[in-house]
Amino acid sequence: MIINRMLRKLQITMLLVLTASCNSDTNANSSTANGTENPISFYFGADLSYVNEMEDCGAIYKNTMGTVEDVYKLFKEEGANLVRVRLWHNPTWTNYSNYDDVAQTISRAKAQGMKVLLDFHYSDTWADPDKQEIPAAWANEINNTEALGNLLYNYTYETLNNLSNANLLPEIVQVGNEINGMILQQGELVWPIDWERNSYLLNKGIEAVRAISEDKNKPIDVMLHIAQPENGLWWFEQATDNGITDFDWIGLSYYPTWSDYDLSEVQTPLATLINTYNKRLMIVETAYPFTFTNADTANNIMGPTALTNNIPATQQGQLDYLNQLHTIIKNAGGEGLIYWEPAWISTSCSTLWAQGSHWDNATLFDNDGKATLGITYYNRAFNE
């Protein structure tokens, strides 16, 4: 495992040197003859935040033919054009999803000519609708909104500046992850949302992205990410009323098992959000089980309630779900779909809670590391 990581670091160093020698905004797959980029009409994305760790834990990935292949190259060849990656502030409990790990992920994605969505969690651990734990280094300022805003701004700017110096700037930046509740809290979330505080902090994060974009003369889109479409309806209304308007993308997690909308109903809230706020929209997290078999001692999160529209938990069902959701997003006017953690397969390593993966039945690889039929969803990119 140590050898694998050393070899990959050597590979990344070589990629950085190669990337630094050319313009990272231009590649053979996205540029016209005059050097300007062809616009991407739809983002076919994969969140590959777990890949570096999984590979260190012995994971191998095979294409649909069963041939072992670099997983970034595999996704690119299938049709993916966007990689999403999470960033924690100072995760002392793991060696992953920190700055160095994220830089490796971005480098690997860009080496394959894919765009990058960087997801700032603004936490040392998982941030989600029920938990937005402030980084330990910022905890003393939790009640000083102005000071906290300055910390958030400086951290966002400096992180992006460091990535810029390595020629690794992302194309899209999430200011927070599933920020249904107020960001940068401690312990139990405070309700109702203190919008004076929340809008100040979020706008400081947005301001930092706009500043680095201007300073580096590179367009970087800003995304705000809410879990589940029904929460997006009230959240963006309240955010807009409280002065949060300078963003480009509405990002949504959509898992039917946790949503009020099943697959046959979800087009309505997506279209409502697009038409109401005149923003671009992307589903940045979704997944579907291809089996209910558990490969290890880590209990699977996706169970029978994950099913929707009578789509079975099979490889064909997984593909059918993605194809149907894709059509729904496009019909609503949306412009992207990202599969969450398609490579989080079962290994001998452990999570915070158990050994193995809690997602092994909902990845895009089976228990032998071979790509499922679901991964061929990305083939649509070649025809759109």
Image (cartoon, rainbow, N blue to C red):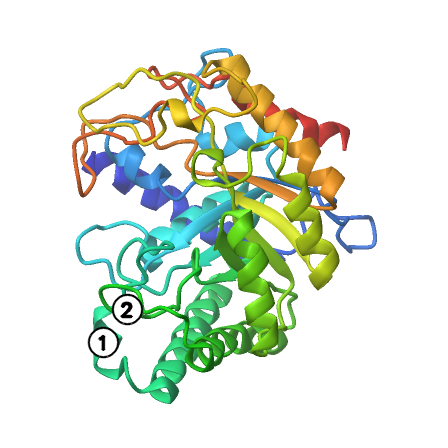
Is residue 201 left or right of 373 when viewed as pictured? left
Which quarter of the rendered picture does the N terminus lie within? top left
Say what secondary structure mark 1 lies in: helix
**Contact flag, marks 1 and 2 (Cβ < 8 Å):** yes
The 10 Å Cα crowd at callout 1, few under 14, some 14 to 19, many 20 or more, is: some
The correct choice, above or below, for 39 with respect to 244 in the image is above
The 10 Å Cα crowd at callout 2, few under 14, some 14 to 19, many 20 or more, is: many
Give the mark count.
Answer: 2
Which quarter of the rendered picture does the C terminus lie within? top right
Q: Quadrant of residue 133?
A: bottom left
Indicate which disc residue 173 carries. none
The correct choice, above or below, for 176 with respect to 193 in the image is above
Q: Quadrant of residue 360?
A: top left
Q: Nearer the viewer, residue 279 or 153?
A: 279
Q: Quadrant of residue 324?
A: top right
The correct choice, above or below, for 163 with respect to 267 in the image is below
To which residue does mark 2 refer?
Answer: 134
Residue 362 at least partly seen: no
Q: Point out residue 45 in the picture as x, y percentages from the top left corner.
A: 56, 40
Indicate which disc residue 139 carries. 1
The residue at 35%/82% (across/down) is: 148
Of the image marks 1 and 2, the number of the one nearer the N terminus = 2
Q: Point out residue 25 in the picture as x, y percentages from the top left corner.
A: 64, 56
Kindly identify the amino acid type of the residue bearing the numbered disc 2: Ile
Is residue 6 left or right of 16 when viewed as pictured? left
Q: Point out residue 165 in the picture as x, y percentages from the top left corner.
A: 48, 67
Q: What is the distance, in whole Å, between disc 1 and disc 2 at their CAs? A: 6 Å
Residue 120 at least partly seen: yes
Q: Point out residue 197 in the picture as x, y percentages from the top left corner.
A: 42, 80
Say what secondary structure mark 2 lies in: loop
Kindly identify the amino acid type of the residue bearing the numbered disc 1: Ala
